[in-house]
Image (cartoon, helix red, strand yellow):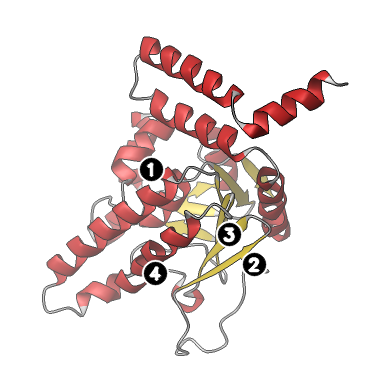
Amino acid sequence: MHPGPVTDPDPAADQPPILLDVADGVAVLTLNRPHASNAFGLDMMRAVEDALSRLAHDDVRVVVVRGAGARFCAGGDVTSFLGSDDPAARLHELAVLAESGLRRLGDLPKPVVVGIHGAVAGAGLSFVLNADLVVAARSTRIVAAYPGVGLTPDAGTSWLLPRAVGTQRALKHLLLNEPLSAEQAREWGLVAEVVDDDAVVARTDEIAAKLATMPPNALAEAKRLVRSAASASRADNAADEAATISRALLTEDAQAAIARFTAR
């Protein structure tokens, strides 16, 4: 498992834009452009897309996302498209790729745990919004950033944020461009836990290790039920719940767990 935030001694070094380590059922995906605050361009998002096939393997039960260096993610890398012959077309390509890749990450049928620290800016928030559980370092600050450069939300932020915190809070965040503290993010429901800065890696690892020991089908179906509930009627959700729990009863994991429970 990756040891967590690191310092890049040579910003010009040819480093992969992400690191991916898999051990004991846990995949750790680390954003690895610390010299650029992990701002992402096409290369990083293509690397995330490439990693998704590995993350989908059965030996991966839990996915952890974290950022190397002093900041989790500064959003899209403005310099990556300003240097293009057609900046608008390059930015459009990046926005499409970021949204589809992060949506696929969030849609994985396994828990996605994100640990954030330092700054989370712009589309970096989409990593948070697509996560299942988020642990924030106490000093974390989340900022929209878009108004500061005259741009608009992307990477699914305008769809996901109001569903997570409500329309008024979403607009306050995206329009006023005021930093949100880790505690405010917890109060708004954007993060599950706030921990001391030096504990965020250990806590995300602890959560991931626990989830990796639990029945994967039960976790995947619970995640699916919760995520689909927002767009389903109460009656459809009730029917889905009943059908899902009855299917779950027939799985080997459930049969073994029920046998242990009834043998007490």
Q: Which of marks 2 and 3 is nearer the N terminus?
A: 2
Q: How far apart are marks 2 and 3 (CA)?
A: 13 Å
Instruction: Establish if 206 lies above or below 172.
Output: below
Residue 4: give its label: 2
Q: Distance between the residues labelled 3 and 1?
A: 31 Å
| Residue tagged 1 | 173
Q: Are marks 2 and 4 in contact (CB under 8 Å)?
A: no
Label 3 crowding class (10 Å Cα cut-off): few <14, some 14-19, many 20+? many
| Label 2 vs label 4, nearer the camera | 4
- Residue type, label 4: Ala
User: Tag 4's secondary structure?
Assistant: helix
| Residue tagged 4 | 47
Looking at the image, which is closer to me, 218 or 250?
A: 250
| Label 2 vs label 1, nearer the camera | 2
Q: Which of marks 4 and 3 is nearer the N terminus?
A: 3
- Residue type, label 3: Ala
Quadrant placement of the C terminus = top right
| Residue shown at the point (18%, 69%) measured from the top left | 90
